[in-house]
Image: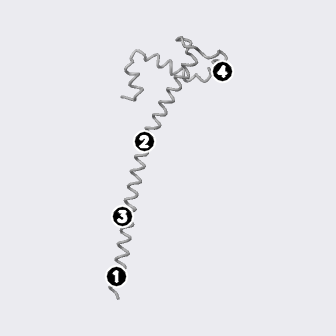
Amino acid sequence: MDTSVNQKRAGHIDRLRGVFASLKKHSIFSKISEIVSGIFKSQGIEYIELELREYENIFALILLGSFIGLPSPPTTLSLRLLPYLGRELLVMQHTSEKLDDALSEIASLFDIT
């Protein structure tokens, strides 16, 4: 009778070891998946920020396009939207200061260092 009880205990202990082993594996896989998803999220955010900068440039080009010969929107609309160009005007000034190196401008778009 003692042997059957010992065998049952041994079976329960083996099952518990299997459960603990699967929990350890699961936690490792969850950590790996968190890391990988974090990498993809950060890359996605970088691409969205790049797209936002390009949309801001297009917005400024539409409003200030008359300086380079593009047809411009009506003056009243341009004047209403002009306060939203504060940051973009600073970016355009900074860009015009570093226009002497076109290769660096292209490299900054692709985040090459």
Q: Which mark is residue 104?
A: none
Disc 1 residue type (three-letter): Asn
Compared to 37, does 91 lie above or below?
above
Local SS, label 1: helix
Q: Earlier in the sequence, mark 4 or mark 3?
A: 3
Local SS, label 4: helix
Q: Earlier in the sequence, mark 2 or mark 1?
A: 1
Residue at mark 4 = 80
Disc 2 residue type (three-letter): Phe
Residue at mark 2 = 40
**Residue at the outermost bottom position:** 1
Compared to 85, does 67 lie above or below?
above
Mark 1 Cα-neighbour bin, 10 Å: few <14, some 14–19, many ≥20: few
Query: Do residues under tags 4 and 2 come within 8 Å of each other at their CB atoms?
Result: no
Mark 4 Cα-neighbour bin, 10 Å: few <14, some 14–19, many ≥20: few
Q: Earlier in the sequence, mark 1 or mark 3?
A: 1
Residue at mark 3 = 21
Task: Give the quadrant of the C terminus.
Answer: top left
Q: Earlier in the sequence, mark 3 or mark 2?
A: 3
Q: CA distance from mark 3 to mark 2?
A: 29 Å
Q: CA distance from mark 4 to mark 2?
A: 39 Å
Q: Which mark is residue 6?
A: 1
Compared to 70, does 29 lie above or below?
below
The x and y percentages for residue 100 are 40, 15
Q: CA distance from mark 2 to mark 1?
A: 51 Å
Q: CA distance from mark 4 to mark 3?
A: 65 Å
Mark 3 Cα-neighbour bin, 10 Å: few <14, some 14–19, many ≥20: few
Q: Residue at x 40, y 29 (%)?
A: 111
Local SS, label 2: helix
The x and y percentages for residue 61 are 54, 19
